[in-house]
Image: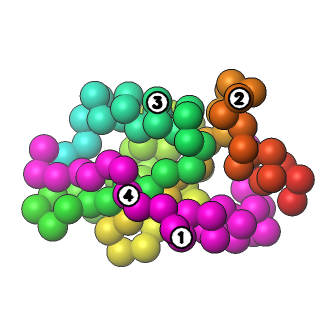
Amino acid sequence: MELRGKQKRFLRSEAHHLTPIFQIGKGGLNEAMINQIEEALEKRELIKVSLLQNTDEVAEDAATAISEAIQCEVVQIIGRVIVLFKPSTKEKYKKISVNVRSL
């Protein structure tokens, strides 16, 4: 699902008040973390991931790796914070994706 400008703007405004729930540190991005991010996206649909100061990862590279691994959309990258969106497959968790689809 490719996001249009209006949809990205809506998701950015929704993500503004979120705090990052994942932090990529000196261990880097690994398979276990990608699985946890995928599970969190299933329940929340919109999350923030931050890169700590001691990591060797670059935000753009980490965002690309995550989005390719779990087929999610990168909404925004600001500095060392990545905003990710993926519509939930379960009906009870679909709160944000319903609003995004209507835009």
Q: Is residue 68 left or right of residue 4?
A: left
For residue 55, which quarter of the picture?
Answer: bottom left
Q: Is residue 89 left or right of residue 55?
A: right
Magenta stretch bounds = 1-27
Q: Identify the residue shown where x is 49% and y is 51%.
A: 47
Q: Which mark is residue 20?
A: 4
The stretch drawn in magenta includes residue 2: yes
Q: Position of residue 42 (x, y in %)?
A: 56, 32
Q: Identify the residue shown where x is 32% and y is 60%.
A: 50
User: Which circle, 2 or 1, is nearer the viewer?
Assistant: 2
Residue nearer the viewer, 68 or 41: 41
Q: Position of residue 44 (x, y in %)?
A: 56, 42
Crowd class of label 1 (few under 14; some 14 to 19; many from 20; radius 10 Å): few
User: Which circle, 4 or 2, is nearer the viewer?
Assistant: 2
Crowd class of label 4 (few under 14; some 14 to 19; many from 20; radius 10 Å): some
Name the N-terminal-most of marks 3 and 2: 3
Per the image, label 1 sits on a secondary structure element best described as loop
- Note whether 39 is above or below 57 in the view shown: above
Per the image, label 4 sits on a secondary structure element best described as loop
Residue under label 2, please give it: 92
Residue under label 3, please give it: 39
Q: Amino acid at mark 4?
A: Pro
Q: Which mark is residue 16?
A: 1
Q: How is the image coloured?
A: rainbow
User: Which circle, 3 or 2, is nearer the viewer?
Assistant: 2
Residue nearer the viewer, 90 or 6: 90
Q: Amino acid at mark 2?
A: Lys
Per the image, label 2 sits on a secondary structure element best described as helix
